[in-house]
Image (cartoon, rainbow, N blue to C red):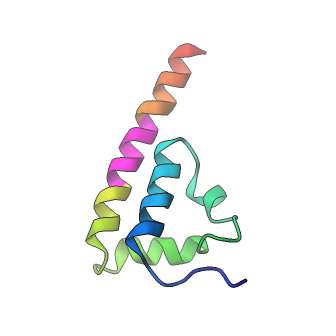
Amino acid sequence: MARPTIYSDELATTICARIASGESVRSICQDDDMPVKSTVMLWLIDGEHQFFSDQYAKARQIQAETLADELFDI
C-alpha cells in the first residue's frame, strides 16, 4: 500500500489530533498509512491548505501546553 500524498481534511485532522496528544510529526509520518514528513511540510507551506495550517498551529499550541503540564507533574 502506498503512502498517501493527496491532501484531505480528514487526514489533516488525524495528523493534528495526534500532534495535539503529544506525538511528533516525525513519529506520525513513520506510520505506513501516513504521508512522509516532507509531504506534510509542503502542505503547511504551499499556501493551498489554510485549514491544515490553522489546525496545525492550534495542535502545536495544545501539544506545548500538554508537555508543560507533564513537566509540572514530573
Q: Position of residue 62 (x, y in %)?
A: 39, 39
Q: Quadrant of residue 16?
A: bottom left
- Foreground: 1 or 48? 1
Q: Residue at x 44, y 37 (%)?
A: 64
Q: Is residue 3 above or below residue 33?
A: below
- Seen in the image, is 51 located left or right of residue 73? left
Give the dominant element type of the magenta stretch: helix, strand or loop: helix
- Foreground: 2 or 44? 2
Q: Is residue 62 magenta?
A: yes
- Seen in the image, is 20 located left or right of residue 71? left
Q: Residue at x 38, y 70 (%)?
A: 9
Q: Quadrant of residue 52?
A: bottom left
Q: Is residue 21 above or below residue 34?
A: above
Q: Position of residue 17 (x, y in %)?
A: 46, 51
> From the image, which quarter does the N terminus lie in?
bottom right
Q: Position of residue 70 (x, y in %)?
A: 54, 24
Q: Position of residue 49 (x, y in %)?
A: 31, 75
Q: Residue at x 69, y 65 (%)?
A: 31
Q: How many marks?
A: 0
> From the image, which quarter does the C terminus lie in?
top right
Q: Is residue 61 above or below residue 37?
A: above
- Range covered by the magenta-colored residues: 57-64
- Seen in the image, is 10 located left or right of residue 36? left
